[in-house]
Amino acid sequence: MAVLPIVQYPAEILAKPSESVTEFNEALHRLATDMAETMYAAPGIGLAAPQVGKSIRLVVIDISDEKSHLIALVNPTVTALSDTLIEGEEGCLSLPDLTEKIKRPSKVHVDAFDLQGKPISIDCEGLLAVCVQHEVDYLNGHVFIDHLSPLKKNRAIEKLAKLRREKAREKKHRTS
């Protein structure tokens, strides 16, 4: 097991659709395990393969407080089950320290495969629904700020740049 480096926005891999998984093998299991370890170490509640530099349709999610209910979804597709939208603060490991309010369907259905290639279906609501949608967005070449209006997205990008400059200054002061 290994903690993998997390790709940072605006890396090109985050903006392109991922390839479907066709082989359910040990390499896929190892990647899912490493992604889970990376997500827990970050800490986060979800991680998509493009965020660790792999352009394949794989996500790992664990919204439990105990970090004991890991879900791995291979080739997931999401269908809204509800016209009701919920607005919540979303953040992302590829856009650290940035959060924005995003509206998403409150209930979704996801069809996917597990790591052995067996079909699975899950009805999700609340935080799990939001997390599934957030991670599957990555597989489709979108980040959460893509859901914002152009003005709000530009402001978020400027805020992210400012946060990164501040972190760089802090790091420089600590090392000098």
Image (cartoon, helix red, strand yellow):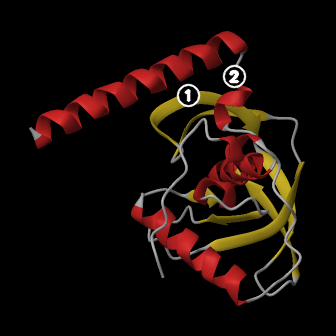
Q: What residue appears at the point 72 percent right and 48 percent down from the top-left corner? A: 138
Assess disc 1: are there few (<14), some (14-19) or many (≥20) residues with their C-alpha within 10 Å of its C-alpha: some
Rendering coords of residue 68 (x, y %): 51, 76
Question: Residue 100 shows which numbered tag?
Answer: 1
**Residue sitting nearer the eye, 172 or 159:** 172
Q: What residue appears at the point 72 percent right and 16 percent down from the top-left corner? A: 149
Q: Give the amino acid at mark 1.
A: Glu
Question: Residue 148 shows which numbered tag?
Answer: 2
Mark 2 vs mark 1, CA separation in Å: 9 Å
Q: What residue appears at the point 48 percent right and 82 percent down from the top-left corner? A: 1
Q: Looking at the rendering, which quadrant does residue 46 occupy?
A: bottom right
Element type at mark 2 = loop
Position of 96 compared to 89: left or right? Answer: left
**Residue sitting nearer the eye, 161 or 136:** 161
Q: Earlier in the sequence, mark 2 or mark 1?
A: 1
Rendering coords of residue 159 (x, y %): 46, 20
Q: Give the amino acid at mark 2.
A: Leu
